[in-house]
Amino acid sequence: MDKLKIQASGALSGDVVISGAKNAALPILMAGVLAEGDFLVSNVPSLRDVNTSCELLRCLGAEVTDLGQGQIRISTENLNEFCAPYDLVKTMRASILILGPLLARFGTADVSLPGGCAIGARPVNLHLHGLEQMGAKIEVEEGYIKARVDGRLKGAHIFMDMISVGATENLLMAAALADGETVIENAAREPEVIDLANCLIAMGAKISGVGSATLRIQGVERLQGCHYRVMPDRIETGSFLVAAAVTRGRIRCLDADPASLESVLAKLEDAGAAITTGKDWIELDMQGKRPKAVNIKTAPYPGFPTDMQAQFCVLNVLAEGNATITETIFENRFMHVPELIRMGANMELEGNTCIIHGIEKLKGAQVMATDLRASASLVIAGLVADGTTTVDRIYHLDRGYEHIEAKFQGLGAQVVRIK
Ligand SMILES: CC(=O)N[C@H]1[C@@H](OP(=O)(O)OP(=O)(O)OC[C@H]2O[C@@H](n3ccc(=O)[nH]c3=O)[C@H](O)[C@@H]2O)O[C@H](CO)[C@@H](O)[C@@H]1O
Ligand SMILES: C=C(OP(=O)(O)O)C(=O)O
């Protein structure tokens, strides 16, 4: 199994080109099921989850061609299978996003029920309830969600009990081909939901309220393939910015989207970073200073993203002062904490809050994490730890960070992959 070996690296400096967003690319690839004719997606990051999505589409009978340079072409002309098998779903929870599109276009879908995962139980009740409100008959048998609808799904007024990115995306895709109007209230407003909505609109969907908590979808009978470019990855961007901040460096993220990162940039400024932005770039300069501690509470967008929580734990571990980090989205998203403590961090957990007392230095260690962002936080910690840090189980990182070691090397970091 591959590992990353990280040496204390000094201040990061230089430019890093940001990839397309994993969390936008995955639903957009699934939306390919809705479209007739060729669908071309560009700025798709080369990631394990993207490969899994392509494999899933292929196993349904879709033709998926990797044209290189981040371009993927999907044709659903020969799609004739309607089952997302356990073997694929177990490696990528986002496979659940195939449910809405399959049901809306073909009236039938069997999707393995995703299990819990390292960060929490992650139920899919909101996805299923919304589809039932649209007329689907759903049963769970032998670990599979079996969803059927006679004719088309019907427009419905759906109030989401809690804000869910995935449920909003599944229902948005389903509603695009439903008969009549669907209103989704208390919808997630994450930039990736907006990116998916814009892609559906480019396919011919009629959606208003994009970016707000109330989405109105006037169902259409057919959607057509289009060319859509995936938005930049705001979490990858934020991860590099935090790495630069803890190493007291100065970097520029290119092909980025500053507008999608406001809460993160505000916290970096509170930590003492000078942030400058252009239309598609962000520069962070710590001017050689140690970051100051910043309190964080995760929340749905436009609040502070849970996917940046682990990275900000590391920032606080090395910051001047004390901080609390409260996780409100997932019930078990502090797997990095015991590993950071093994590296010398002074932090403790109290329920869903982590209390952190900043120290000057960490010590290198062999560490591992059981989820994507926790793993990223350990890589960042390794950059400022004395000696060598080895991060194990990096298949988690390969789910979400394209060419991670090459990008860090480009900023002067000593990060190598050991096969
Ligand atoms: C592929 C992708 O885009 N993943 C992101 C997506 O995950 P995902 O879409 O799975 O996250 P959700 O927004 O759905 O989850 C938010 C909360 O709602 C709960 N919930 C969700 C659905 C449901 O039917 N019932 C229920 O109780 C979840 O357990 C969690 O506690 O949004 C999360 C929150 O921003 C991010 O951390 C993930 O990186
Ligand atoms: C939790 C994440 O992803 P997923 O929903 O795919 O597990 C993430 O990207 O941090």
Image (spheres, rainbow, N blue to C red):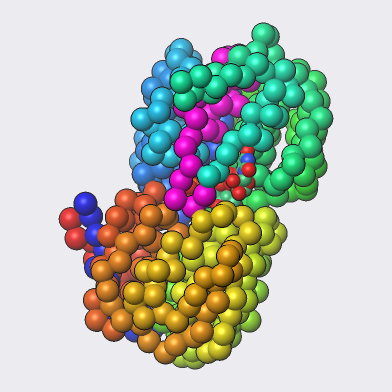
| Residue 370 drawn above or below residue 133 | below
Task: State the residue at coordinates (55%, 18%).
Answer: 146
Residue 127: x, y in percent?
A: 64, 33
- Magenta residues, as a range? 96-120
Residue 64: x, y in percent?
A: 40, 28
348 vs 228, nearest the viewer: 348
Residue 278: x, y in percent?
A: 61, 69
Q: Quadrant of residue 106?
A: top right
State whether residue 168 appears in this view.
Answer: yes
Outermost residue, left side: 419
19 vs 217, nearest the viewer: 217
State whether residue 14 appears in this view.
Answer: no
27 vs 369, nearest the viewer: 369
| Residue 127 drawn above or below residue 69 | above
Task: State the residue at coordinates (72%, 18%).
Answer: 135
Q: Is residue 292 magenta?
A: no
Outermost residue, front side: 350
Q: How many marks?
A: 0
Q: Is residue 98 magenta?
A: yes
Relative placement, left or right, of 316 versus 134 is: left
